[in-house]
């Protein structure tokens, strides 16, 4: 084709080579600009989309695992609630544990309270218990009994202060909490 163009016009060999090189450069430029470059751009875009989609899938898998864990924990909690004694009350449970831990005489007061959350089928039962002149080992034993019971009771808040310097006794205020179906 280049020879057809250059043969009709009287050009010397050097000019024909120059024109051939120019036309070849233009053809190669158009092939790269409109053929290879868009292909490479599309390929890079697809790689980025794949990377983003992989991250989305990983996030979804993590969320699914978390949701499954929460669902399983919820099912276990429901089972435990159903196995719990029908007459269970947090107040009497803590009173019984204080007797078992040998600290019933250290109880200054026990204040029960209840709160509910909108849209929940459960109500929060809280009992604040104040213990005075108690040893650290006794406090730890009592807390362990509360936290490891099969009644889903946990200590929500606790404050500890030293009752007397000489005896190394403590004053502790604990808030124990559980849930009950409404």
Image: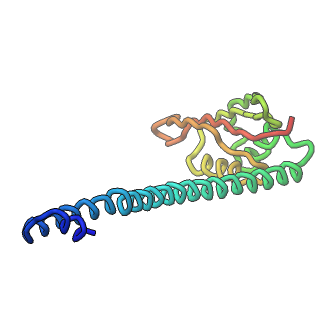
For the N terminus, the image quarter is bottom left
Q: Nearer the viewer, residue 142 or 3?
A: 3
- Horizontal placement of 148 versus 28: left or right? right
- Horizontal placement of 49 versus 176: left or right? left
Task: State how many labels appear.
Answer: 0
Position of 8 relative to 73 (above/below): below
For the C terminus, the image quarter is top right
**Residue drawn at (51%, 35%) of the image:** 161
The percent coordinates of residue 75 (x first, y second) are 80, 53
The percent coordinates of residue 41 (x first, y second) are 39, 57
The percent coordinates of residue 128 (x first, y second) are 69, 32
Q: Nearer the viewer, residue 68 or 109?
A: 68
**Residue drawn at (69%, 44%) of the image:** 103
What is the quadrant of residue 135 in the picture? top right
The percent coordinates of residue 105 (x first, y second) are 71, 38
Q: Nearer the viewer, residue 6 or 63?
A: 6
**Residue drawn at (88%, 53%) of the image:** 83
**Residue drawn at (25%, 68%) of the image:** 4
What color scheme is it?
rainbow
Q: Nearer the viewer, residue 5 or 173?
A: 5
What is the quadrant of residue 158 in the picture? top right
Position of 144 relative to 47 (above/below): above
């Amino acid at each position: 084709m280049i020879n057809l163009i250059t043969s009709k016009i009287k050009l010397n060999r050097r000019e024909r080579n120059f024109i051939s090189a120019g036309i070849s450069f233009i053809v190669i430029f158009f092939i790269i600009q409109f053929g290879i470059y868009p292909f490479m751009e599309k390929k890079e875009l697809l790689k980025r989309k794949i990377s983003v989609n992989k991250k989305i899938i990983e996030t979804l898998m993590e969320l699914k695992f978390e949701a499954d864990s929460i669902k399983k924990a919820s099912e276990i909690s429901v089972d435990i609630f159903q196995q719990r004694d029908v007459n269970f009350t947090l107040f009497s449970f803590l009173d019984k544990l204080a007797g078992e831990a040998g600290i019933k005489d250290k109880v200054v007061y026990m204040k029960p309270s209840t709160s509910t959350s909108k849209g929940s089928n459960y109500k929060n039962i809280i009992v604040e218990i104040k213990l005075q002149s108690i040893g650290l080992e006794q406090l730890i034993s009592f807390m362990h009994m509360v936290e490891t019971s099969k009644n889903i009771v946990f200590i929500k808040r606790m404050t500890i202060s030293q009752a007397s310097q000489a005896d190394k006794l403590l004053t502790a205020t604990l808030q124990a909490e559980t849930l009950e179906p409404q």
